[in-house]
Amino acid sequence: MTASTEPCRELRIARVFDAPRERVFEVWTRPEHQVHWMGPKDFTVSACEIDFREGGSYRTCIVEPTGIEYWMRGEYREIVVPEKLVFSFAWEEEGERGVENVVTLQFFDEGGKTRFEFLQTPFQSVAERDGHNGGWTQCFDRLAAYLETCMITAHADEKS
């Protein structure tokens, strides 16, 4: 088996979020939203900069409860509102750029809910892929909870 066909080289996650596709897409594109859900459980976001346009970049710092910081960065390669986002992803490690991979997000309207498909590739090892799987899964749990809060707020605003 060649390296390019090894199953460890990609991570796929699918979820359904109980929110409209436009809302789910929006919370991926604005720092004032990402600070509430980006990162695994119990992490916080200490910095989030987004230049949301094709060719634009992002840079975010997530912080463990122990205070250890993890910086991620990338560039937006493709934006199709509200259907698709493609961006590069890399961890910054002690001033050096980490190994870069590509994340593709697809958002499908399912009658007021959103079917979300996530693909990240390539990984250097199964351990690296599995670490990202755990982190992203917790992140998407936080995203679901945040979207629920957003939807409650949106409904309250509509009634005012």
Image (cartoon, rainbow, N blue to C red):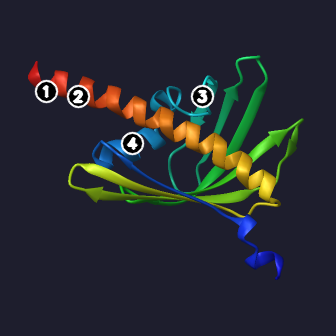
> Mark 2 and mark 1 in contact (Cβ < 8 Å)?
yes
**Disc 1 marks which amino acid?**
Glu
Report the mark closest to the observer, 1 or 3. 3
How far apart, in angstroms, are the residues tagged by discs 3 and 4? 21 Å
Viewer-proximal residue, 50 or 160?
160
Label 4 sits on residue: 26
Residue 155: name its quadrant.
top left
Disc assigned to residue 158: 1
Looking at the picture, does residue 144 appear above or below residue 129? Answer: above
How far apart, in angstroms, are the residues tagged by discs 1 and 2? 6 Å
Find numbered disc 1 in the image and state the secondary structure of the residue it sits on. helix
Residue 83: name its quadrant.
bottom left
Upstream in sequence: badge 3 or badge 4: 4
Q: Residue 77 location in percent, x, y?
A: 58, 60
Disc assigned to residue 41: 3
Q: Residue 98 location in percent, x, y?
A: 83, 49
Q: How many marks?
A: 4
Neighbour class for label 1 at 10 Å: few (<14), some, many (≥20)? few
Report the mark closest to the observer, 3 or 4. 3
Neighbour class for label 3 at 10 Å: few (<14), some, many (≥20)? some
Looking at the picture, does residue 158 appear above or below residue 138? Answer: above
Left of 62 or right of it: where is 97?
A: right
Upstream in sequence: badge 3 or badge 2: 3
**Disc 4 marks which amino acid?**
Glu
Viewer-proximal residue, 134 or 117?
134
How far apart, in angstroms, are the residues tagged by discs 1 and 3? 31 Å
Q: Residue 73 location in percent, x, y?
A: 69, 43
**Disc 3 marks which amino acid?**
Lys
> Mark 4 and mark 2 in contact (Cβ < 8 Å)?
no
Label 2 sits on residue: 154
